Amino acid sequence: MADYKKTIDFIKSVYGNKEFTPLAVPVFAGNEKAYLNECIDTTFVSSIGKFVDRFEEEMAKYTGCKRAVVCVNGTNALHMSLMFAGVERDDEVLTQALTFIATCNALSYIGAHPVFLDVDLTTMGLSPDAVKEWLIKNAEIRNGECYNKNTGRCVKACVPMHTFGHPVRIEELALVCEEYHIELVEDAAESIGSLYKGKHTGTFGKVGVISFNGNKTITTGGGGMMLFNDDELGAYAKHITTQAKVPHRWEFRHDHIGYNYRMPNINAALGCAQLENLNKCVASKRKVATEYIDFFNNVDGIDFFAEPENTFSNYWLSAVVLKDKEAQLDFLQQTNNNGVMTRPIWELMSRLQMFEKCENDGLRNTIWFADRVVNIPSSVRLEDL
Ligand SMILES: *Cc1c(COP(=O)(O)O)cnc(C)c1O
């Protein structure tokens, strides 16, 4: 068994040698308190208020999309996004088994079925090669729509996830989806601030989803956002996620089944303050990653997972790749026993009882990562801001 004491000491030193080093905690270094106080002083803590509009406008400007629409959390933003992409009951959705449960829960709320395809070794995210290969083998186009020849179901959408903030080969995925008439919905929950060839993740498809949960790069307490390049769809999304109320000074009229998924003003206030420091937060995470890269270059048996080519990663969660499953468990035990919080990558979706019968392509790289990847402490450092 390897002794990871040197690595444990190094990780502790990256975060100031505290007794306990958590995986990812938020930092509040700017106008958070001022904006929250403003909500309370003006009584606008709930479903209306200027911070909601401001947060949406500033996120649209920051990411370069046409319209950004807030949600209560990233999971319901994904649910809504799939709905806006046209996914219906019994459709199939191509996605990765190497993801957080929210991706699959969201499509399940609609009654759609995931098809789990493999990830790239370079990105840890959905592989355009795997998608193409599966489509060539299994898909046919009828009346301008893509169908799975074996199940007869419509393959409506493809949901790549930018794992730990590292962008997938999104341009190639977009091309495959276009060729097969499949809607592209990006789960960019982890990748705010990450770029593919200079363009923000979450802006390549029909809809992109960001999460502002407490462990993400910036937080609103709980919250999510949908990014649209289509103004009209964005406006429709705003309407549907705010109870589909027809604007009027006093009448209560609603023209669709709507959802109460709007982020409260108090959360948006936190988001506006956090957004002011987002670039510094990303810079801090990237600085931490650079320190890890330098260190792990000289460590046998542990590889640090670095950003793929053509990308700028927010390094939301730093990850290392151990030699095998045994080494992974050993590393997890030694770090967690010594005050350094680490976590294995998520249990694969294809191994959970709700999804174990879903189709998959063998998931060779996915399983390889599942047996080896461990996340190490990755918080933004206050002193970097
Ligand atoms: C965080 C996350 C989400 C959304 O999570 P919420 O907690 O609902 O905001 C969705 N997908 C992935 C991959 C995530 O990491």
Image (cartoon, grey):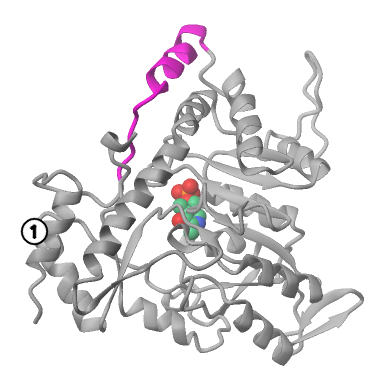
**Which residue was labeled with disc 1?**
338
Q: Quadrant of residue 50?
A: top right
Q: Position of residue 79 (x, y in %)?
A: 62, 53
Q: Secondary structure at mark 1?
A: loop
Q: Looking at the picture, does residue 359 appear above or below residue 297?
A: below
Left or right, residue 137 beside residue 122? right
Where residue 377 sits in the image (x, y, percent)?
A: 26, 54
Residue 334: % across, % down: 11, 67
Q: Residue at x 54, y 15 (%)?
A: 44
Number of numbered discs overlaid on the protein picture: 1
Question: Is the residue 224 above or below the residue 96 in the image?
Answer: above
- Image point (13%, 48%), residue name: 20
Residue 122 visible, this orientation: yes
Magenta part of the chain: 25-43
Q: Quadrant of residue 339?
A: bottom left
Q: Quadrant of residue 205?
A: bottom right
Along the horizontal axis of the image, is 117 left or right of 81? Answer: left
> What is the crowding at mark 1: few (fewer than 14 residues within 10 Å), some, or many (at least 20)?
some
Quadrant containing the C terminus in the rendered view: top left
Quarter holding the N terminus? bottom left
Residue 49 appearing in the image: no
Where does the image place residue 61, in percent across and percent down from the top left? 65, 36
Residue sitting at the far top: 41
Amino acid of disc 1? Asn
Mark 1 CB near ligand 1 (8 Å cut): no
Asked if residue 28 lies in the magenta stretch, the reply is yes
Q: Which residue lies most toward the right here?
A: 143
Q: Nearer the viewer, residue 257 or 265?
A: 265
Q: Using the image as rendered, state which of residue 84 and residue 184 is in the foreground.
A: 184
- Residue 312, compared with residue 220, is above or below; it is below
